[in-house]
Amino acid sequence: MEGLYFDHAATTPVRPEVVEAMQPYFTDFYGNPSSVHAFGQKAARAIEAAREEIARLIGAERPEEIIFTGGGTEADNLAIKGIAMAQKDKGKHIITTTIEHHAVLHACQFLERHLDYDVSYLSVNEDGLIDLQELKSALREDTVLITIMSANNEVGAIQPVREIGEIARKNNIYFHTDAVQTVGQIDVDVVQDKIDLLSLSAHKFNGPKGVGALYLKKGIKIVPQMSGGAQEGRKRSGTENVPAIVGMGEAAKLANANLEKKQAKYSRLRDLLIERIEKEIPDVLLNGPRGDKRLPGNVNITFRYIEGESILLNLDMLNIAASTGSACASGSLDPSHVLLAMGRPHELAHGSIRFSLGYGNSEEDIDKLMKDLPEIIQRLRNMSPLYDG
Amino acid sequence: MYSEKVMDHFQNPRNVGELEDANAVGEVGNPTCGDIIKLYLKIDDDDMIKDIRFRTFGCGAAVATSSMVTELVKGKKIDEALTLSRDKVAEALGGLPATKMHCSNLATEALQDAIEEYRKDKNAKKN
């Protein structure tokens, strides 16, 4: 499609190599992987090859620790509800944060409402980072799970995953992390980081939509959330989405081969865009940390005095895609729960825009964006009763 | 998501800005909810809205409804202007998404606020 795409944290284009790898699994190798015949076994082998690639991408020691799911949301639900149901006799306390993706937040709220779980929600500082001391103080005798995202999808804050893993392991508590935003973007290592469960999603790293995975460390029991034919080591029933899994495997392979280069490239583009916005547009505020604690492709800026949806609409008229934490674009009444948790007042949260960079973006794209952005912001400010410029 | 008419008013808003000789000003909303609409009216001695301007902080619907309200009431008597409802504004714009009907269709309230202030002032002067 024509235009400038700065919404890679929402979803990414599928790389041509991935589409090519998937193609024959629709038309030629369409067997059911549970079938004994050659058609089925061809598909089953392809799934195992993908499983190995994904295990390698996150540093898992055994491919069988990867459970394919229908996406990141399902992986989060399987991890959180699966552990909670398996551990309910040990304890009914979970620790998470206020800035999780709704897949995690709502899964935790489900447990509070329906299974009498107690959930502690850790706060974050103004950069969107958790405090390890607060985590330690939240630990209880009956804590069975810590679930904290590896990096935040809105403001790009990378959490101290390794330190969290150490705290969890030392206290014999399972540690789940929603790593949908980090896998394929920065180095992820479940062994070094002492992660017990990890959710990932293919379409965030140039794979297809509708497929994801849960890493489940060997020996940990979860209660499956889908009853049926006992696929995926009895942990996720339902005929495997073979072409999508193959695509996810190919995307993982490509990510593995390019990780360092990709990380360096998008960190540089990110810093360039932040620098240019801060230099060329007055009254802006960067949301989230700077430097190594920020996801490579993430830029999240509040433009004071104006509202996010109107900025998005103006950008969209020029065929430029971004996203906003404003409530007005989401259909809810409150703006981004992440920005509010970081202590941003409502009017600043309403005016936030996320530009997320990825595959296909170049310095030239930033030049093109910056040709129009200052004028759009000024035009909207001139219309705003909050602005006396 | 938005009708063509909404996008037209958002892209080319009518009557944006302030009126230096406004004799009625109305404001509605607050930064928390994400929409603030401020209307400036020049009402003549025959209670006719001679001129009107707006400034709006808010989403596409908030801007478009503000713009439409100014267009619909300009040149009208204030009694008639007061009959303008949210639904009529939405209708004139070719409809609004359901989620925007409540939070972003506030311009009629700003108008009522302005006219109420104007009448109070006028009565005060009479007495």
Image (spheres, coloured by chain):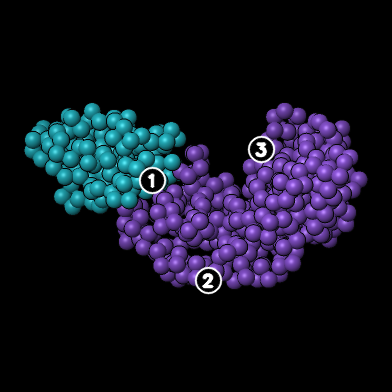
Chain colours: A purple, B cyan
In the drawing, does residue A377 fall left or right of residue A87?
left
| Mark number displayed over residue A106 | 3
In the drawing, does residue B37 fall left or right of residue A110?
left
Inspect the image, locate mark 3, and give the three-letter code of the amino acid beneath it. His
Helix, strand or loop status at disc 2: helix
Q: Badge 1: few (under 14), some or many (20 or more) residues near its Cα, within 10 Å?
A: many
Give the residue at mark 2.
Answer: A363
* Disc 1 to disc 2: CB gap under 8 Å: no
Instruction: In this rendered view, identify the residue nearer to me: A281 or B10.
Output: B10
Inspect the image, locate mark 1, and give the three-letter code of the amino acid beneath it. Gly
- Can see residue A101? yes
Give me the residue at 80% from left, 57% from top. A53
**Image location (x, y in percent) of residue A126:** 59, 56
Extreme residue in the left direction:
B45
Give the residue at mark 1.
Answer: B60
Instruction: In this rendered view, identify the residue nearer to me: A58 or A46.
Output: A46
In the drawing, does residue A146 fall left or right of residue B106?
right
In the drawing, does residue A342 fall left or right of residue A134?
left
User: Which chain's residue wears label 2?
Assistant: A
